[in-house]
Image: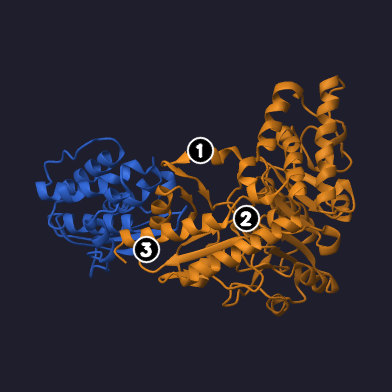
Chain colours: A blue, B orange
Amino acid sequence: MNIKELYQEIILEHGKNPRNLRKTDNFNKDAKGNNPLCGDNVHIYLKLDKKKKVEDISFEGSGCAISMASASIMTDLMKGKEEPEVKEIVNDFLGMIKENPELESKNLKDDEKTRLMCLSGVKQYPMRVKCATLSWHTLISAIDNAQEEINTEKLD
Amino acid sequence: MSISNIKKEFPIFNNKIHNNDLVYLDSANSSQKPKSVIDRVNKFYTNEFSNTGRSVHYLAVAATNLYENTRSSVQKYINAKDKNEIVFTKGATEAINLVANTFGQNFLEEGDEILITELEHHSNYIPWHFLRKSKGIKIEFADVNDDGEVTLENIEKKITPKTKLIAITHLSNVTGAILPIKEITELAHSKGITVLVDGCQGAPHLKLDMQDLDCDFYAISCHKMYGPTGLGILYAKKKWLEKLPPYQGGGGMIKEVKKDSVSYGDLPNKYEAGTMATAQVIAFDQSIKFLEKIGIENIVKHEQELIEYGQEILRKNNLVKLIGNPKNRGAVLSFTIKGVHPHDIATILDEDGVAIRAGHHCCQILHDKLGISASARASLGVYNTKEDLDQLNSSINNCKKIFNL
């Protein structure tokens, strides 16, 4: 594994110019997450319509290129997806980052899978996996209306 | 022992990291161990092991003598007046918690103030925060200035008639600022204020003289002093150890135990309940010997040269910003690179075998004040060289290249 495979252009680009780095107007779900070991933090805002479809999703926070790129790619990809699809994609992504070689979700188009697989390099850097997964855990927390802040030290 | 080829005393430098020589710049976190220390742990467990202070058999007596021998070495090394002013703990964190739980619980009252600084490591804040919660004690923070220092004047400004304890770092683990402890203690004592020094970074890098510093408490982390993990030291003036209650109850710390009464052992046993980190204490004697063989004056000189050199090359590197510019700086160079998050810096440097730390270094209050969430930190030890700093600089350049800067 070469360090350049971790820091691919797409990650650097999303890290530098994160999409959806703002606060959604009239959001109806939100959650905060933080990584107490390094101080990274994220706040996810979600606006679901009546059919529980993601009308808008955004985030605020600060962190490394990996965590910012991950939140940027994730929020970009979730727009227009329905709540069960969102959850399924999150699980698929977390499974891929942990152990699965590929993404298996039927709710992801090929080009979406390609974009997400850019983050797969993180697997080789166990200390950095939390950077890539923080916003994803926080999104689930927002959907479930969990009151407790996501803390990477309390996750598997 | 010459400092110029000291790396060979440390077996870890025989290893390759990602096929590169190890450039270890994380000694403020924990230092590497010389072979003499590693061998001493091995020898104790292999040939000499026994618990201390309890049994009368040969091994127990020998182990007790070795254990107490380290106490004497430490006393001498830090120039404490009395051997019994040295209390072994599981770390500097426990040493500070010991003071919070004994001094704090018995000599502080609601409304009293503890003065710390914005530079403090969490371990010199949270134990006092517990007292704030349990006893209604107030915590005040002396300001850090733009150079990353806390001056005597900044301390004086925050002293009030309610100040009962000043708890300060000797050497900042982020800005590297060395605080004027002797002057602060003099000022504090003139106002009847007790002083605790967090010596985690001071002890490995500065000449220690407790009688000269005159502080009441000094906390030491042995694993940052080329010693084993799981071991710290609380230096405390005898008058305090005699006056304060025990910290933890258990075996080894008692004089007599009855169903309706308990009396406690003499110093230092009163503060060392349960089986201690025996092998670590015995091996730590070798760390002291290692430091003495090189000579702390030589260590200070060597590290000062490196700090000057490191500041010089990093200042010339555009986009790199050093954190703090203290007049008296010890062994720490924290920095940021415009456009690269510290975690990314650390991961990229690691690929070249350069080990630094990224994050808030357990100093969130300081980072908040600096307006950043994290920084990268290169911290030095006796084994570092100018070549290490050149490698740091060239890996930083590689990092900038990867980020297209």
Where is mark 2, residue-wise?
A: B123
Q: In this view, does A67 lie above or below A155?
A: below
In the rendered image, residue A41, in percent from the top left (x then y), is placed at 39, 59
Q: Residue B15 carries which label?
A: 1
At mark 2, the secondary structure is helix
Question: Left or right: B77 with respect to B136?
Answer: right
Out of B167 and A145, give the one closest to the viewer: B167
Question: Left or right: A103 with respect to B157?
Answer: left
The subunit carrying tag 2 is B
The residue located at (55%, 41%) in the rendering is B13
Where is mark 3, residue-wise?
A: B340
- The reply to whether residue B172 is visible in this rendering is no
The subunit carrying tag 1 is B
- Circle 1 or circle 3, nearest the eye: 1
Marked residue nearer the N-terminal end (2 or 1)? 1
Marked residue nearer the N-terminal end (3 or 2)? 2
Contact flag, marks 2 and 1 (Cβ < 8 Å): no
In the rendered image, residue A17, in percent from the top left (x then y), is placed at 25, 66
Q: Distance between the residues labelled 2 and 1?
A: 32 Å
Marked residue nearer the N-terminal end (1 or 3)? 1
At mark 1, the secondary structure is loop
In the rendered image, residue B53, in percent from the top left (x then y), is placed at 84, 30
The residue located at (25%, 64%) in the rendering is A18
